[in-house]
Amino acid sequence: MKKIVKTLFIVLGFVSLGLGLVGVALPVLPTTPFLIVTAFCFARGSERFHRWFTGTGLYRRHLESFVEKRAMRARSKAFVLVMVSVLLPLAMYFAPWLHARIAMGAVLAWHWWYFLFRVKTLKAGGDAGGEAGGEHTGAEAGGGIGAEAVAEAGGGDAGERAR
């Protein structure tokens, strides 16, 4: 059973990676959330794939500063917030059920709160590998790509690592 679950995480990781790669080329499809899901799935499914993914330029360019320091450049944060603020209301408009609209509204509100108060803002010249420094928009939140970061993103038990 455990092997099936790990295989499922690996498959979901590659599907998410594919969607994230499409998102690099298509501005309508957000890249970062799919890459976060990819990192989560690979961390749960395969240490080897997780190491490979975290070593890629795609990971370093889009996620490293966020995962390691819970920080993003202001431009990146603004882009994510604008995309979500445009796409979610569109989805809300076309959703046939009131409950779905309410849920999407809650996700939108949570997304804004999280990015404004929990994700630090790096200075314009901030280096993903260097000190975060500069202004902060929210709480200090450290952590690496370890199980704690995965658990906070919805991954469950912080002590459980992919083996």
Image (tube, rainbow, N blue to C red):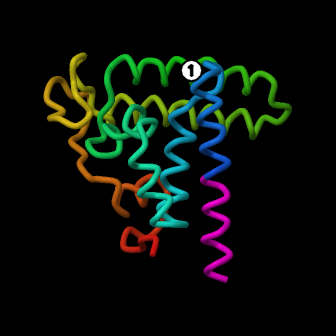
Residue underneath mark 1: 83
Write down the quadrant of residue 34 in the picture.
top right
For this rendering, which residue is in front, 23 or 66? 23
Query: How many dots with numbers?
Result: 1
Give residue 45's position: percent from left, percent from top: 55, 66
Report crowding for label 1: few under 14, some 14 to 19, many 20 or more residues within 10 A (C-alpha): some
Residue at 52% x, 59% y: name it.
42
Q: Position of residue 23 (x, y in %)?
A: 61, 28
The majority secondary structure of the magenta stretch comes to helix
In this rendering, the answer to whether 142 lies above or below 65 is below
39 left or right of 91 in image: left
Residue appearing at x 51%, y 65% in the figure = 44
Which is more toward the observer, 90 or 44?
44
Q: Residue at x 58, y 29 (%)?
A: 30
Residue farthest to the bottom, as pictured: 1
**Which amino acid does the dot numbered 1 rest on?**
Met
Secondary structure category for the residue under label 1? helix
Could you tell me residue 157's position as x and y percent?
Answer: 43, 70
Above-or-below relation of 45 to 97: below
**From which residue to which does the magenta span run?**
1-13
